[in-house]
């Protein structure tokens, strides 16, 4: 009971900063758009996720939830959710075998809809639990990494149901990816290390929306920021914003802190690790623990000192250099800190909740594939957030609206 009470307090605190999702949950309780539907979800089990689960349950859904990262689960929140009548299969710090067993247990619900964060649940459905595919009529994906995998499945015609790319909305890319990841990543790094960023050289691998946010926050704290990229347009963007851009091979020799934010694997490899200076810190803000080649680091190390600080392991190389790996190479913002602020997740999960309701309504007419969130949902979330914070905006006049919809008016 003590654990459940602690979780209730955590959820209540998060809900204070999530007025939009709270209002949607109240609306769902009246409209019941998910009445009778079974939802299997694989998401980070945090207080913010709990507010989303509460909104979906209020909409009439039966829910089974597994964790999308074994190190991000908040056990007290998981226990509180069980008290809500939600089947939660998650525990902090479990091994990978147990992590996948939990996903299978969530799928045992026999879902009509699935919610995923990284595509592990959808992947298991299409490889190991194909007996359930006929009953699944749609899904939602929360993160960039998962959408990359889903688009590849769709291209190979392996995806058997429609999935809404919740990550690919303007509100989520701007606020969640840029501001949320930017702040929470550095929060996790500073909690794990207590380092001062001013004057340090920070290497940010990847300049998408998440990488841009990390670079901006590091620069704002006085760091010298180097960006590595494979995309010429993004590299040019970083250059024009004043960042130094170079290949990882060169950045490896000068960086004090390395942060990977790419959604790809082996971004930092053995040859990069071999070139790094003594005391370099390695952190990952991409979804999976493959962006830093941790296996290569293990093989290179003469000695590994676990837990020199919470969520910090020290790898001693044969020549005496020491490299510090944070959060085992997993998501540093959710392992060493608490993830995005609740105010950010209010918009992301509001879009997610509305997308689930839209999908439940439209799924029968959708072919298998990856779909963008309808633009009106994105605008509704932004409008509700502005209203909740007391911010007003201008409205088009009749003449302005007519001008925008006419080609006859000249200069």
Image (tube, rainbow, N blue to C red):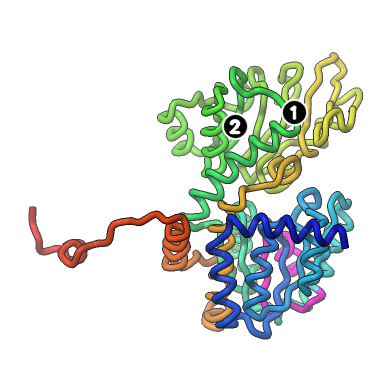
The one nearer the camera, 299 or 76, is 76
Going from N to C along the chain, the mark reached first, 2 or 1, is 1
Classify 10 Å Cα crowding around label 2: few (below 14), some (14-19), many (20 and above). many
Which structural element holds mark 1?
helix
- Farthest residue to the bottom: give it: 36
User: Disc 1 marks which residue?
Assistant: 193
Give the distance between the C-alpha atoms of the residues marked 2 and 1, in whole angstroms: 17 Å
Number of callouts? 2
Image quadrant of residue 320? Answer: top right
| Span colored in magenta | 108-128
Q: Is residue 334 visible?
A: yes
User: Which disc is residue 111 wearing?
Assistant: none
Disc 2 versus disc 1: nearer the observer: 1
Report the residue at 69% width, 42% height from top.
333
Residue 100 placement (x, y as % from top left): 83, 60
122 on left or right of 319: left
237 on left or right of 186: left
User: Disc 2 marks which residue?
Assistant: 204
Above or below, 21 against 130 in this view is: above
Residue 63 placement (x, y as % from top left): 73, 74
């Amino acid at each position: 009971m003590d654990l459940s009470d602690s979780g209730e307090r955590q959820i209540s605190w998060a809900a204070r900063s999530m007025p939009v999702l709270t209002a949607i949950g109240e609306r769902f309780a009246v409209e019941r758009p998910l009445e009778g539907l079974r939802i299997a979800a694989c998401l980070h089990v945090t207080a913010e996720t709990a507010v989303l689960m509460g909104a979906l349950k209020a909409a009439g859904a039966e829910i089974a939830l597994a964790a999308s990262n074994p190190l991000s689960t908040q056990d007290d929140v998981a226990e509180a959710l069980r008290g809500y009548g939600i089947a939660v299969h998650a525990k902090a710090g479990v091994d990978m075998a147990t992590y996948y067993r939990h996903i299978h247990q969530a799928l045992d619900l026999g879902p009509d809809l699935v919610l995923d964060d990284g595509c592990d649940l959808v992947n298991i459905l299409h490889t190991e639990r194909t007996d359930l595919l006929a009953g699944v009529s749609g899904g939602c994906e929360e993160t960039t990494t998962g959408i990359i995998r889903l688009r590849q499945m769709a291209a190979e015609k392996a995806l058997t149901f429609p999935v809404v790319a919740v990550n690919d909305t303007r509100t989520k890319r701007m606020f969640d990816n840029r501001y949320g990841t930017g702040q929470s990543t550095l929060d996790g790094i500073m909690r794990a290390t207590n380092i001062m960023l001013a004057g340090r050289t920070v290497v940010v691998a990847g300049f998408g929306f998440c990488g841009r946010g990390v670079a901006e926050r590091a620069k704002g704290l006085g760091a010298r920021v180097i960006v590595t990229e494979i995309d010429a347009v993004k590299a040019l963007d970083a250059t024009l914003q004043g960042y130094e851009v170079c290949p990882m091979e060169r950045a490896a020799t000068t960086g004090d802190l390395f942060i990977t934010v790419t959604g790809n694997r082996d971004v930092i490899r053995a040859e990069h690790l071999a070139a790094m200076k003594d005391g370099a810190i390695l952190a990952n803000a991409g979804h999976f623990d493959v962006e830093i080649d941790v296996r290569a680091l293990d093989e290179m190390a003469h000695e590994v000192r676990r837990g020199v600080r919470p969520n910090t392991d020290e790898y001693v190389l044969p020549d005496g250099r020491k490299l510090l790996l944070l959060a085992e190479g997993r998501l540093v913002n959710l392992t060493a800190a608490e993830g995005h602020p609740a105010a950010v997740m209010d918009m992301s999960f509001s879009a997610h909740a509305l997308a689930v309701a839209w999908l439940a309504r439209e799924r029968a007419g959708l072919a298998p594939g990856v779909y963008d969130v309808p633009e009106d949902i994105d605008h509704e979330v932004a409008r509700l957030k502005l209203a909740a914070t007391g911010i007003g905006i201008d409205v088009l006049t009749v003449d302005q609206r007519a001008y925008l919809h006419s080609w006859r008016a000249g200069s």
